[in-house]
Amino acid sequence: MNKPVFTVEEIKRKIEQYCVYQDRCHKEVEQKLKEYKLIPEAREYILLHLLEHNFLNEERFAKSFARGKFRIKKWGKERIVRELKFRDITAYNITSALKEIDEEEYIKTLYNLVEKKNESVSETNHFKRKKKIADYLLYRGFESNLIYEALKTIDS
């Protein structure tokens, strides 16, 4: 089966739509461009166009990613940083993205997760119970010092 052939302008419009639908990082856009098997000059031309017209903005992507993953998926900062690094986001943009997370809201979310998880864990051994909750929160990407502080609120 033959894949349809597109002009560079058509591909440019498709990639614009791809970026408009949701903020994207360079890595995602480059991956998408590879699917069209363009020559390097055409890829560069499209990337440059996307950057110049603000379809592609790494800082905006990092900020919305951090906000979204924290608010919707309740991820901790460590997991957000790990995922942003995986997407080749610069340290500067990662730092600026983490500023999007309100410290008070962050701590409140952590304590709410501790409370919820404590209710759902059926383990009767107090230490095993705390370990299960801690493991869950570490997986979520919360900092261990904050987790152990929050675990102190669980009744023995």
Image (cartoon, rainbow, N blue to C red):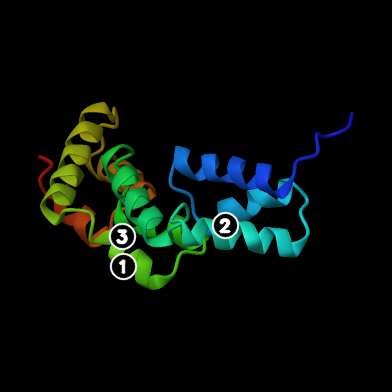
- Return the residue found at the far bottom: 92
Q: Which residue is mark 1?
A: 95
Give SS at disc 3.
helix
Give SS at disc 1.
helix
Residue 72 point in image, percent of width and height: 30, 37
Taking 10 as reference, is 56 above or below it? below
Looking at the image, which residue is at 13% across and 41% down? Answer: 154
Whichever of callouts 1 and 2 sits on the residue coming sooner in the sequence is 2
Q: Which residue is mark 2?
A: 27
Q: Is residue 138 something one can see in this rendering?
A: no
**Left or right relative to 133: residue 40:** right
Distance in Å between CA atoms under marks 2 and 3: 17 Å
Residue 148 point in image, percent of width and height: 20, 55
Give SS at disc 2.
helix
Q: Which residue is mark 3?
A: 97
Residue type at tag 1: Thr
Looking at the image, which residue is at 35% across and 58% down? Answer: 78
Q: Quadrant of the C terminus?
A: top left
Whichever of callouts 2 and 3 sits on the residue coming sooner in the sequence is 2
Residue 26 point in image, percent of width and height: 54, 58
Residue type at tag 3: Ala
Q: Nearer the viewer, mark 1 or mark 2?
A: 2
Q: Callout 3: 10 Å neighbours few (<14), some, many (20+)?
A: many
